[in-house]
Amino acid sequence: MDTTLTPTVARINGVPLHAASEALDDDSLRQRACTELLRQAAMQAGLLAMDDAPGLDGSTSEAASAAIEALLSAQLEIPEPSDEACRRHFDAQPARYRSGDRAQVRHVLFAVTPGVDVRKLRDRAEALLLEVRCHRDGEADRFAARAAELSNCPSGAQGGDLGWLRREDCAPEFARELFAGAEIGVLPRLVHSRFGLHVVEVLAREAGHAPDFGAVRGAVALALRQQSFVSALRQYLQLLAGAAQVEGVALDSADTPLVQ
């Protein structure tokens, strides 16, 4: 008797999100589901032709992308932040707007690539994080050895050394984690970026220049508008999911790449 299991195909209102032979990690599956919810909503709003069809590889047509943008512009209300709100945000996160901060960094990259088992990859990264955080001073440089052995970054050949980095030298999500505090040593958490999972050690820091509020008021307002957009998009996606027939994908959490 054939006991081969056929992979479950995730669907939104009957529309498949992937081919039957394709296995996706949870984040990628939720990404596609959210995009499909928005594509179908744009179609229902008359912004997209009814014969538009998504690709089984997760791609969308140019018309669908434009229609989704028009849909979000019409549906999401993004308030303009007040001066008071901008000031509170600036006072609460002064390091975020300081310019010229530098950190001497090395890392071990566990790259997220197509087909990789993200759970197993995270387990490996967390095991290494625990190992390098628990090594004793005076022992051999375990971080450099593990970087050479495990890192998917070319810097592994130099023990993971990335040299001195500024915010603008890094992917934004990496920079947010790296410059969020003043920690020296191995950061106590994995750093997530578009490239994968990083175990990061900060060897030294140099503080930069703290600007006046007036000089960065525009950047602060932009950050607050982005926060409002993310919140509004999350709520809108939850409403769409609640009204849709969702199969094979968990959308009870809106923490997907689309709304981060």
Image: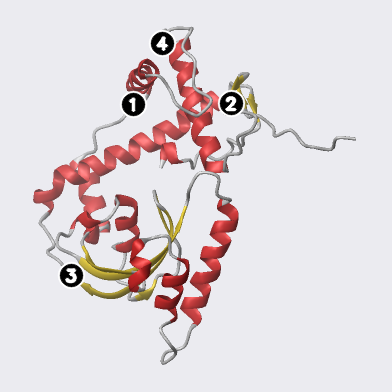
Residue indicated by mark 4:
48
The quarter of the displayed image where residue 26 is located: top right
Secondary structure under the numbered disc 4 in the rendered image? loop
Residue indicated by mark 2:
242
Quadrant of image for the C terminus? top left
Marks 3, 1: nearer the viewer: 3
Distance between the alpha carbons at the discs numbered 3 and 1:
38 Å
Q: Looking at the picture, tell me which residue is in the foreground, 56 or 103.
A: 56
Q: Looking at the picture, tell me which residue is in the foreground, 86 or 122.
A: 122
* Mark positioned earlier in the residue sequence (4 or 1): 4
The amino acid beneath tag 1 is Glu
- Give percent across and percent down for residue 84: 21, 45
* Mark positioned earlier in the residue sequence (4 or 3): 4
Q: Residues within 10 Å of mark 3 (few under 14, many from 20)?
A: few
The amino acid beneath tag 4 is Leu
* Mark positioned earlier in the residue sequence (2 or 3): 3
Find out whether the residues at labels 2 and 1 contact each other: C-beta distance under 8 Å: no
Marks 2, 3: nearer the viewer: 3
Q: Looking at the picture, tell me which residue is in the foreground, 22 or 188.
A: 22
- Give percent across and percent down for residue 38: 46, 23
* Mark positioned earlier in the residue sequence (3 or 1): 1
Q: Residue at x 48, y 84 (%)?
A: 135
Distance between the alpha carbons at the discs numbered 2 and 3:
47 Å
Residue indicated by mark 3:
207
Residue 79 in the image: above or below residue 214: above
Distance between the alpha carbons at the discs numbered 4 and 3:
50 Å
